[in-house]
Image (spheres, helix red, strand yellow):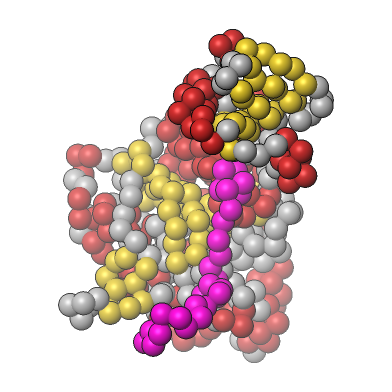
Amino acid sequence: MFKDESEKLILNLPFGFRDIFPVEAQERKEIEDIIRTEFFSWGYGEVKTPIVEFTRNISAGVGKDWKDKLISLFDVDGNLISLRADMTIPIARLAGMRLKKENLPARFYYFANSFRQSAQQKGQKRVLNQAGLEFIGSDMLSADIEVLTILVNILRNLGIRDFKIALGHTKFIDGICKWFKLGIKEAEFVRENMILKNFVALTEFLDKKDTEKTEVFIDLLKPAKDYKTVAVKFSGIEEKDAQESVLYIRQVYKLLETLGINERFIVDLGTIRNFGYYSGLMFEIYSPKVTELLGSGGRYDGLIKKFGLDVPATGFALDVDLLHKSIDNLAGQDSQKKNSIILCGRRDSVAEMIKFSDRLRKKGNIVELFFDFPEKILLKESRKTDFIYGADFDTGRVTVLDMKSGSREISQISDF
């Protein structure tokens, strides 16, 4: 495979992956710290799972098109394994194998990379840096409300403006398919085109079944600001599953209204996910700054049962990369900002420089060491820093240059 050590290496990455430099990495850490604080304050505990799982386990939740979604390989023992495509399935596996009913409800959160296959020509990323939570062991409405409230708090704390959360329900599509009296393959065709948002194909297909019903259905797929608008449009549909879905969304919306956060929500009965484990309320998060979803979530009451314990669950996942793109200024960033210092000195003063820099760090500063670098060279480099300290340990003096004001002071090193 590798013929010669002198052979040129490939100077790019596999498609869908990228490098992250320190500034962005630090900003992402600040985002994660804000999210973690909210999770922790509600009693959620962090869990970590392996980056790979048996493909058979992951495919049980991903759905029938798992080969197109998973990055898979053969293990040394011949078993087919896959990189996790999300964190819900691994945590469902963990819960089914390790939890007992007396330990419920269980509240977990995570920060992890997930990996998904993508066609090369689409140019989509194949690694998702995700933050999310899972509330395991409750099928109550209160669990869904808790999860949605935490989600709103996080987005607000991050300073993301004008975000919207679209509410949908799996039973709506199930009910509509029964309303049209569709067979299994026909219902699957409807779901696939709902995921693709191919409403032209949907309309043409359903028009052949019932033109009037199609008109009502397509009208219901338009996002509404509140459930009242949906209720008026929905009045002619008597199918049980569809009715239950809208009734549940109505109950959720009323509680969100009581909490004073309903303005962040819309009702979108066209909300549908391409993971096969959702079983009830579903939601998607939008920001005007990005075209992709900031995140998504919902209820998955039947998934954990596949791994042992039969318990309901709900949760959500946020894309940290997209959160980063959606934020103008990190909330609280300025008040928590540390001073950045470049400390200059001679090469023969290494020990003294390190000791001095440690004293500065203990006071909450960020200190970067440079040896034999005159100030004028540092200025030409335009390095992002608040202060430049030039230390002379023979005289015990330090020259402090304030990069914002341009002022210069000479102090004693012992004063620090």
Q: Main secondary structure of the magenta part?
A: loop
Q: Is residue 409 above or below residue 54?
A: above
Q: Is residue 351 above or below residue 409?
A: below
Which residue is pictured at 26% across the width and 52% down the height? Answer: 95
Extent of the magenta region: 1-27
Quarter of the image for residue 87 reads bottom left
Q: Please state the horizontal and vertical placement of residue 53, each as a whole percent of the image.
A: 29, 66
Q: 329 or 65, which lies in front?
A: 329
Which residue is pictured at 45% across the width and 28% down the height? Answer: 351
Q: 203 or 17, which lies in front?
A: 17
Q: Is residue 261 above or below residue 339?
A: below
Q: 405 or 245, which lies in front?
A: 405
Residue 84 in sight in this render: yes
Point out the image quarter for the C terminus.
top right
Which residue is pictured at 47% across the width and 70% down the height? Answer: 116
Point out the image quarter for the N terminus.
bottom left
